[in-house]
Image (cartoon, helix red, strand yellow):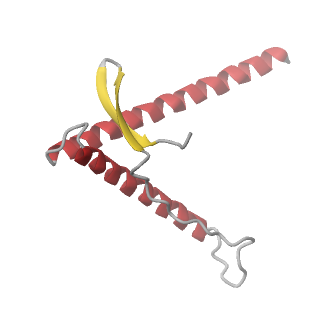
């Protein structure tokens, strides 16, 4: 029984590691695309306009994801004759320019500029 539990734990951890690798690869790919978009507009890091450009791209992406979540939530309650069990009130919160930061990161011998909103701390 202990061996079976160890095998299941190993399989689970392997799956989690694979998901983390995929998420990291996606993050780096988006960072490269966003960087290229802002550079094509003539802005370079660490100029304020570059950071503003990256924030605008991130904000648009997050807003689109938020809209998709809203639509998914609404389609759960297709029965209009009865209200949902609780009122769903979720408002979009745009990115905060005061907490939006970019930084250089080297991964796999390649340099990236990762940007994002930092948590209050």
Spot occupied by residue 23 in the image (x, y as percentages of width and height): 47, 35
In the picture shown, does residue 104 fall above or below 84? Answer: above
Closest to the observer: 82 or 50? 50
Looking at the image, which residue is at 34% across and 40% down?
30
Looking at the image, which residue is at 31% across and 30% down?
112
The reply, left or right, for residue 32 in relation to residue 79 is: left
In the picture shown, does residue 84 fall above or below 16? Answer: below
Spot occupied by residue 90 in the image (x, y as percentages of width and height): 58, 65
Q: How many marks?
A: 0
The reply, left or right, for residue 3 in relation to residue 106 is: right
On the image, which quarter does residue 110 sit in?
Answer: top left
Residue occupying the far right of the picture: 1
Looking at the image, which residue is at 36% across and 22% down?
107
In the picture shown, does residue 66 fall above or below 120? Answer: below
Spot occupied by residue 29 in the image (x, y as percentages of width and height): 34, 36
Spot occupied by residue 91 in the image (x, y as percentages of width and height): 54, 66
Closest to the observer: 14 or 1? 14
């Amino acid at each position: 029984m202990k061996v079976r539990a160890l095998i299941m734990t190993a399989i689970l951890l392997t799956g989690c590691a694979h998901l983390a690798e995929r998420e990291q690869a996606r993050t780096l790919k988006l960072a490269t695309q966003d960087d290229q978009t802002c550079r094509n507009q003539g802005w370079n890091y660490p100029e304020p306009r570059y950071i503003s450009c990256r924030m605008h791209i991130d904000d648009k992406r997050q807003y689109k994801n938020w809209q998709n979540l809203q639509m998914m939530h609404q389609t759960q309650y297709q029965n209009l004759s009865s209200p949902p069990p609780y009122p769903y009130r979720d408002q979009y919160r745009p990115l905060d320019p005061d907490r939006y930061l970019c930084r250089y990161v080297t991964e796999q011998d390649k340099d990236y500029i990762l940007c994002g909103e930092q948590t209050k701390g």
